[in-house]
């Protein structure tokens, strides 16, 4: 039994190291992949793009809500040293404007509550240089999604 203590201790030690590395590095790898993927689908840096209505054939994220319409904007404060002005157009149903940093952390969320919202993102209020801004709007039917398509035209994410 004493001969096994060394290998068991080493296995436990290596398991702890591997676990710590995964916990530390996984969020940035996940966000980097998401940032790249939405860019490959045409979402510009500092510009919103409305995703297609969520259906099994259009979803790229595990379990997105089929009742929500999603608009995304990639931000890079390195390309916008004066900040980024973000505007979410008014929508008469549920809407939210969420900001995610390079580690997948949601660092700010603003509810729409039926009125337009505006926020200026800059190095002082963003924990990372790059990230994703997401607008979610309740659109459970095709008619609601069509309304979101029209409303989303007034969303804006622009470098200052």
Image: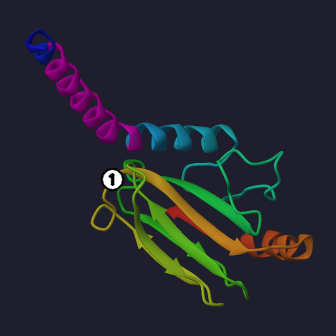
In the rendered view, tell whether residue 53 sits above or below residue 103.
Answer: below
- Quarter of the picture containing the C terminus is bottom left
Q: Is 11 contained in the magenta span?
A: yes
Give residue 77's position: percent from left, percent from top: 39, 53
What residue do we see at 58% from left, 57% from top? Answer: 73
Quarter of image, res 122: bottom left
Whether residue 78 is visible to the viewer of this picture, yes or no, is: yes
Q: Give the range drawn in magenta.
A: 7-27
Residue that mark 1 sits on? 128
Q: Which residue is drawn at 54% across and 62% down?
A: 158
Identity of the residue furthest to the left in this view: 2
Residue 42 vs 110, above or below: the answer is above
Residue nearest the viewer, comparing 76 with 11: 11
- Its colouring scheme is rainbow
Magenta span has 21?
A: yes
Residue 98 or residue 81, whichever sits in front? 98
Q: Where is residue 88 in the image (x, y as percent from the top left)?
A: 61, 76
- Image quarter (top left, top right, bottom left or bottom right) of the N terminus: top left
Question: Residue 13: where, in percent of width, then height?
Answer: 17, 26
SS at mark 1? loop
Say few, some or many: other residues with alpha carbon within 10 Å of mark 1 (under 14 / 14 to 19 / 20 or more). some
Q: Where is residue 10 in the image (x, y as percent from the top left)?
A: 16, 19
The extreme right residue here reads: 143
Q: Main secondary structure of the magenta part?
A: helix
Residue at x 37% of width, y 49% of height: 103
Instruction: Please give left or right for residue 84 compared with residue 68 in the image.
Output: left
Q: Is residue 88 found left or right of 30 in the rendered image?
A: right
């Amino acid at each position: 039994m004493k001969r096994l203590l060394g290998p068991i201790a080493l296995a436990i030690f290596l398991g702890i190291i591997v676990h710590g590395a995964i916990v530390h590095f996984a969020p940035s790898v996940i966000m980097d992949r998401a940032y790249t993927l939405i860019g490959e689908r045409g979402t510009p840096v500092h510009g919103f793009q409305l995703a297609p209505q969520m259906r099994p054939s259009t979803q790229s994220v595990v379990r997105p809500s089929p009742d929500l319409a999603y608009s995304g904007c990639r931000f890079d404060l390195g390309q916008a040293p004066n900040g980024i002005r973000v505007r979410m157009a008014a929508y008469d149903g549920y809407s939210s404007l969420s900001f995610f940093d390079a580690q997948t952390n949601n660092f700010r969320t603003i509810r729409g509550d039926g009125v337009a919202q505006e926020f200026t993102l800059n190095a002082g209020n963003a924990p990372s240089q790059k990230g994703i801004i997401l607008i979610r709007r309740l659109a459970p039917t095709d008619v609601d999604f069509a309304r979101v398509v029209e409303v989303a035209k007034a969303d804006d994410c622009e470098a200052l």
